[in-house]
Amino acid sequence: MSLFLRRFTPVAQLRWGAAHTLAPRRLMSKGTLDPMTGELTALPDINISALEVIRNTKPATPPPSSTLVFGHTFTDHMLTIPWNAISGWGVPQIKPYSPLSLEPSSTVLHYAQTIFEGMKAYRQEDGRVTLFRPDMNMKRMNNSAQRIALPNFDGDALLELIKELIRIDKHWIPKEPGHSLYIRPTLIGTQKAIGVGPPTEALLFVICSPVGPYYPKGFKPVALYGTTEYIRAAPGGTGAFKLGVNYAPGVMPQKEAAAKGYVQNLWLHGPEHYLTEVGTMNMFVVFRKENGAIELVTPPLDGMILPGVTRDSVLALARDHISGKNPLSKLPDNLIVSERPVTMKEVKEASESGNLVELFGAGTAAVISPVDRIGYLGEDVHIPTGEGGMGPVSRPIWTELVGRQTGTISSEWSVEVTK
């Protein structure tokens, strides 16, 4: 081990001030069977008091915000936590951003044993740094890990370590409005063996990337290709989990959609052509009912749909508006929220009758992405868009969401990282 690698400082000794002190936390992870006795044993969970911090001695200068390309620039440090089936979660390290060392036989490279999350840290007008509903990301990441037999972990402990990583690299968060720090927690199987099975070794790591607004020149509605040739997910499959294996198969269909003049795929399922997701985002469609009511519809969480944080936030805001708990300015009073299946037949008929109000995607990167047409079975189904590209439902919900993320609207969804 080099002299540089030995010069780490335990987090308990770092002089961050009281607000940055990590309290000791060590839990036991979900039990495993002892191979000798067959008895259930518990392995050590993530221990935040054991954190080692290795400072980058050659930190980079953050580039001008105007030059940022989403996901192409990374901060000076990363977080890594190893795991194995004998000793559980090992020593967490925050260290310089650098390549990973993996054996060519590592199971992630052969059997796609990888999961990830997408989160954002925001710099508020008063200088504070906050995360948006990170507890939901930790819960979903654990659910994804369980689905492909990767190890579970204490989500609260990982979140505290992520906060520490953000504090160290907080100067990378752009100050300009609409900018943020994109955070990518990832968990991979690293067992050095060729053979399908639960890995006996794994690595959890977190990297950070400064990003600008998804629509730097304002909202521009996108055109979707109603994809019937391929499917994104199927009942009983992995569509409800954030796995790497769910994303690569969508690249080729997206290229084909682009060649036809469309920006993304609208994933359709079954002979009825049920709408499921928009590219890598959840999907919402808004109808005008015969009685004049406005119905906000999104497909139910039936095992094919990813339980998106933005999806949940949109639904919560809409329902709080309806109940009167938190009325939103300019959002229709006669709003109805439905989690139900919706087919392209219903969307097309609503478009032709003038009862289709809008359709949009929702996700961490774009927040809200309006749609203006869908290529479907050789013709375009046209979708209304309002002033500035957004409709009467998406616009006020987007305004509230972004306000809560950036701190202009106080919310319990905003979790403080630094004061």
Image (spheres, grey):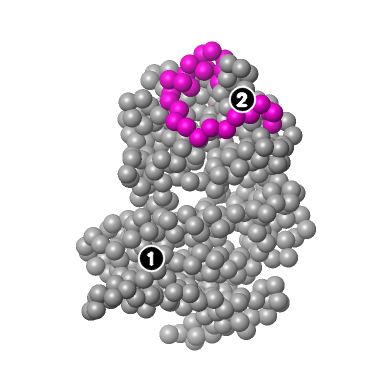
In the rendered structure, the answer to whether residue 103 lies left or right of residue 358 reads: left
Q: Residue at x 72, y 61 (%)?
A: 128
The answer to which of marks 1 and 2 sits earlier in the sequence is: 1
Q: Amino acid at mark 1?
A: Pro
Q: Residue at x 78, y 58 (%)?
A: 126
**Numbered disc 1: secondary structure:** loop
Q: Nearer the viewer, mark 1 or mark 2?
A: 2
Q: Amino acid at mark 2?
A: Ile
Mark 1–mark 2 CB contact (< 8 Å): no
Residue 135 - label:
none
Residue 290 shows up from this direction: yes
Q: Which residue is mark 2?
A: 294
Q: Position of residue 40 (x, y in %)?
A: 32, 73
Q: Tell whether position 145 is magenta.
A: no
Q: Which residue is mark 1?
A: 151
Q: Residue at x 63, y 57 (%)?
A: 131
In the rendered structure, the answer to whether residue 114 lies left or right of residue 385 reads: left
Residue 104 shows up from this direction: no
The residues colored magenta run 331-360
